[in-house]
Image (cartoon, rainbow, N blue to C red):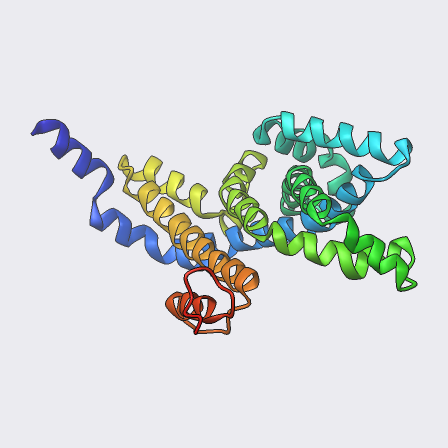
Amino acid sequence: MDPLRTLWETFFDWDSMREALPEMLTVGLPNTLILAVSAALLGSVLGMVLAVAGISRSRWLRWPARVYTDVFRGLPAAATILLIGVGLAPLGMQVWGPDPYPLGILALSLIAAAYIGEIFRSGIQSVEAAQMEGARALGFSWGEAMRVVIIPQGVRRVLPAWVNQLIALIKDSSLVYFLGLVASQRELFRIGQDYAATTGNESALLLAGLFYLALTVPLTHVVNAIDRRLRHGRAAGAPDDEIEDADLALPGAVGGNQR
C-alpha cells in the first residue's frame, strides 16, 4: 500500500489545492481563456485564408498555403512559440513593451491556423459541386457563391473538428510560460508549477488539470449537441426519441406504418 499512499499524498493534498485555488480562479483561468480565445479567433481568420488559398486554381496561392501548413503542422508547438516569442522579442519590445502575451498569442494563432486551415479546406471541398453550379446559375459570382453558399455549409460540417482544435489550443496555452511571465500573467499550468515547486507537492498541478477538464469536457458536449441539431434540424430541447418517432412516421419511411 506504500505506492498508493505516496500517490495519494503527492497528488491529492487538499490543503495544497485549497491554497492554490484562489489564484487559479482569479489569475490563471482568465489568462488561459485570453490566450486560447484570442488565438482561436486569429487562427480561424488566417485558417480560412489558407483554406481558400489551398483550393485556389492559382499555384501562387496554393503552394505558399501548402508550404505554410506543412511547416507549422510539422514543427513542435514549443519550438514555434520559442521561435516567435524569442525571435521577435526585440520587435515586440518596440511595439508594446516587455509584455510576452501578444507574441504568445501570435505563435498560438500561427500554429492553430495551419490545422484550422486544413479543417476548413476539407469542409469546403466536401460541399457538393452542384451547390456551386446552382449558385452560379442564379447569378452569383464565384466569390459570392463561396461566401454565401459554400463556406457556410463547409464550416458547419467541420464544426466538431474546429472545436477540437480549440480544445487543443486551451491545452497548448500552457506552453506560453516558456516566454517568461510575471505573476499577474501566469496561466493555470504555470501557477500549478509554481505551487508545486514551492510546496514540494504536485497537488496544485492536478488541480490545474482539473481546470482544463472543466473547460474542455463541457465544450465538447456543447458542440456535439449543436452538431446534432444542425444535422437533424432538431428544435431546441427536443429529445432524440422524438426525432426517431418523427422519422418513422414519415410516408414511405422504412419500417413506418403505411395503411
The residue at 27%/34% (across/down) is 200
Residue 12 shows up from this direction: yes
Q: Residue furthest front?
A: 259
Q: Position of residue 178 (x, y in %)?
A: 55, 34
Depth check: 247 or 73 in front?
Answer: 247
**Residue 66 image position (x, y, % from top left):** 77, 30
Q: Give the side of residue 139 with respect to residue 167, left or right.
A: right
Residue beneath the point at 72% across and 44% down: 47
Spot occupied by residue 135 in the image (x, y as percentages of width and height): 84, 59
Most extreme residue toward the left is 1
Task: Kindly tell me whether residue 94 is visible in this rendering.
Answer: no
**Is residue 197 positioned above or below 163 on the image?**
above
Where is residue 83? Give x, y as percent: 67, 29
Residue plotted at (51% across, 51% down): 32
Query: Where 142 sits versus 247, above or below?
Result: above
Task: Give the residue at x 67% y 53%.
Answer: 155
State which quarter of the image contains the N terminus. Answer: top left
Q: Quadrant of the C terminus?
A: bottom left
Residue 169 sits in quarter: top right
Residue 51 in the figure: left or right of residue 176: right
**Could you say which quadrant of the image residue 165 lies in?**
top right
Q: How many marks?
A: 0
